[in-house]
Image (spheres, helix red, strand yellow):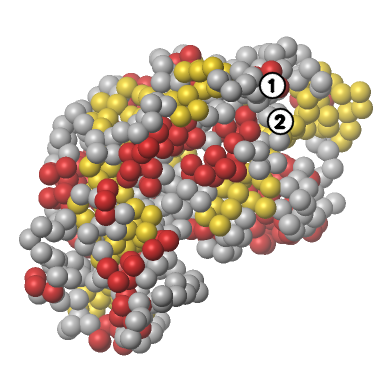
Amino acid sequence: MNTFSGVSRRAGLPGSYRLHRDNRQRSLPLLVGTPEAAKAGSAPEIYCTRKDTVIYGARRRPANSTNGVGSMTKVTDMTGAVSSAIEDGQSVYLGGFTHLIPFAAGHEIIRQGYSDLTLARATPDLIYDQMIAAGCASSVTFSWAGNPGVGSLRAFRRAVEDGVPTELAIDEYSHFGLVSRLAAGAQDLPFLPLRTFVGSDYPEHNDNIQFVENPFGDTPGEIPVVPPLTPDVAVVRAQRADTEGSAQLWGIVGEMIEAAFAADTVILSVEELVDTEVIRSDPNRTLIPQTVVDYVVEEPYGSHPSYAQGYYDRDNEAYLAWDRQTETHESTEEWLEEWVYGVDDRTEYLEKLEVEQFLDLQPQTNYGTPIDMGEY
Amino acid sequence: MADYTDTELMITRAAQELQNDDTTLVGVGIPNLACNLAKQTHAPDLEMVYESGTVDSNPSKLPLSIGDPVLATDAQSIVPMIQGFGYYLQAGRIDVGFLGGAQIDRYGNINSTVIGDYDDPKVRLPGSGGACEIASNTHRTIIITPHTKRRFPEEVDFVTSPGYIDGETTREELGLRGGPDAVITDKAVMRFDDDGEMYLDSVHPGVTEKAVQEATGWNLQFGSDVVETEPPGDEEIDLIRNELDPDGVYTQ
C-alpha cells in the first residue's frame, strides 16, 4: 500500500502523539507518548508519567538499522559535522527566525573552541549571545540584536559597548536588507535592490549599502542595493529530512532557504530522519534540497530553548532566565560551564533538563489534511 | 467609567486607529494586544501579518514573540521572510505598521539603533529588525511609546526608521510610501501636520497640556482643538484582562 511510511509508523503506536526515533549512537533520553506507545518501544525506561503522557527512553537501535545508510553517507553527528565543516576565521550563518534555531550546533561550536568567527544571523538571539560570551566571534552581521519578547542581549552589548570578552565588529542591516543579501548570495547576483534605507542613517555607517541609478525610469531615480552574503558555512534545521538531506520544514521558514542556498557548506540538523518516500510524497514541502546539503545530523530537541513547530514549544522560561543569568560576564561564563562545556553533546544537555519542562513544551496534535499528489 | 492603566489606554487608543479592512504588520506587546482587541471588537476582518512571515495569523493565545508558534498554527499562509518583506510589505500590501523606539523626533523619525555615537555607543539598542522597511513601505504607521523628555528629543541620535525627515524633503521625493500617522503615548496622542511636524491632538484624562510639553524635548505644536482622549470602555478592559492578556504579561 502506498502510504506515508512516517505516518503509518506513528499510527502503529496507538495514541502516540510524538515519538522521536533514537539516534544512531545511543538511546536518546526523552521520548514522549502514551503508556501504550512506551510499551511498544523496545524495553523503554520510564522517566516520568503525567496524566496519559509518559516520558521514556528507548533502547539503542542496532547500528545496521539506520535507514540503509551507506559508506558515502552525509549522516553524521554534530561533533563530526562541526569539526569537518568549520574552520577558525570563517563566516558562519546559523539559520532560523525565532523558530528552529540550531542551538545544539552553536553549543558544539563553543565546545570545540572556535575563535575569530564572523557570525551572521538576522536575529543573533540567545545562541549568538552565548557564542559571543564564549569568545567565538570577532564580528557579527545582524539586523535585530535583542532577546525576543524579553529585552536586550547582554553579552552582545558587553562586547559592542565594552569589548568584553573580545572586541566585536558589527555589520548591521534591517531584516529585509540582510535577507536580501542572502537572496543575492543564493542567486549568485552582484547585488539586489530594495526599497529600504532611504532616509535612514544606515547608508552613512555601512559601505555595503550603496545606491544605483534606475536604468529604466525615475520612480525612483536611484535605489539602494546590497551585495551578496555568502557564508562559508550555514547550519539550518528542519523537522525532517531523508539521509541525503532533502529537508521538509513547516511553520515559520524565516531566512533558512536563502541561507542554505547562499552558503558554501551546509550542515542540516533535523528532529527526525525519515524515509525518502515520506519526502517524495509531499515534494512542495521540501524547501531545502539535498543538492545544497553537505552534512545531515539527526538531533531531536536540537533547537531547545527555541522551538520546532508541532514538536515542542519555545521554552520561554529559558529566555527569561537568560536575561538574569547574563547580568555579568562571570555569571554568563558559569552558565556556559554548566550547560555547554559541562556536557559532551545534546543528549547530555537534554538529560540535565527537568522532565516537567518537556511535558510543558508538548503541543497538542493538530495535523494538516494530507494532499493528493495523484498517481499518474 | 472603567478603571484602567496607562498601558490599557494605549492599547485601546491604538486599536481605534485600525479599520476593519486593514492589513497590519504587528509587533509583539502593545501593538499585538491593540490589533487583537480591534479584531474582537470593531475590526473582525483585520488581517494580521507578522515579520516572521505569518499571514492572517489567528493566535489562540498571547504570542510571546513575533515568531511564536501560535502565529503559525491556523494562519492563512506562512511565507519566507524574503516574500513577506518583498511581496507583501515592499509591494505596498500592508496598510498599517506599528513602531516603537528609544527616541522619536518632531518629524516622526525614530531611533531604535543606538544612544550616543554609532561607533562608540553609550547604549547599543537592538537595531532595526523590520522597522526601517515598515516605516518606508506601509501606507501609515502608528508609533507607540512612553512619553518622556529623553524619548522625545529635538533630534534623534540615529535615524533607524524615517518619518517626515526634516520637514522639507518630502517622503514622496525620496520614494517613501505613507508615513507616521499617530503617536500614542501614556500622556497624549499626537498627529502630523502637512509639513510633517508633530502636533498635540488629544491629552489623556487627568493629564495637562503642560505635562505633555514638559515631557517633550522641543516646542510641541498644539492642534487647534486639543480634546481629551477617549478612555477605554468596560468591554475593552474586560477583553484585555480576561482574554487577551490574562496573565498580565504586557499590561501589568
Which residue in the structure is indicated by mark 2? B178
Work out which quarter of the rendered image holds the C terminus of chain A and state it.
Answer: bottom left
* Viewer-nearest residue: A288 or A120: A288
Task: Report the chain holding disc 2.
Answer: B
* Viewer-nearest residue: A51 or B109: B109
Extreme residue toward the right, this view? B225
Question: Tag 2's secondary structure?
Answer: loop
Q: Position of residue B249 (x, y in %)?
A: 57, 51
Question: Tag 1's secondary structure?
Answer: helix
Residue A372's tag is: none
Q: Position of residue B153 (x, y in %)?
A: 64, 17
Q: Residues within 10 Å of mark 2 (few under 14, many from 20)?
A: many
Q: Residue at x 40, y 67 (%)?
A: A282
Left or right: residue B165 compared with residue A178: right
Amino acid carrying mark 2 in the image: Gly
Amino acid carrying mark 1 in the image: Arg
Q: Earlier in the sequence, mark 2 or mark 1?
A: 1
Tell me, yes or no, whether the two marked residues, 2 and 1, touch with CB atoms within 8 Å: yes
Using the image, determine if residue A253 lies above or below residue A172: below
Which residue in the structure is indicated by mark 1? B171
- Kindly tell me whether residue B232 is visible in this rendering: yes
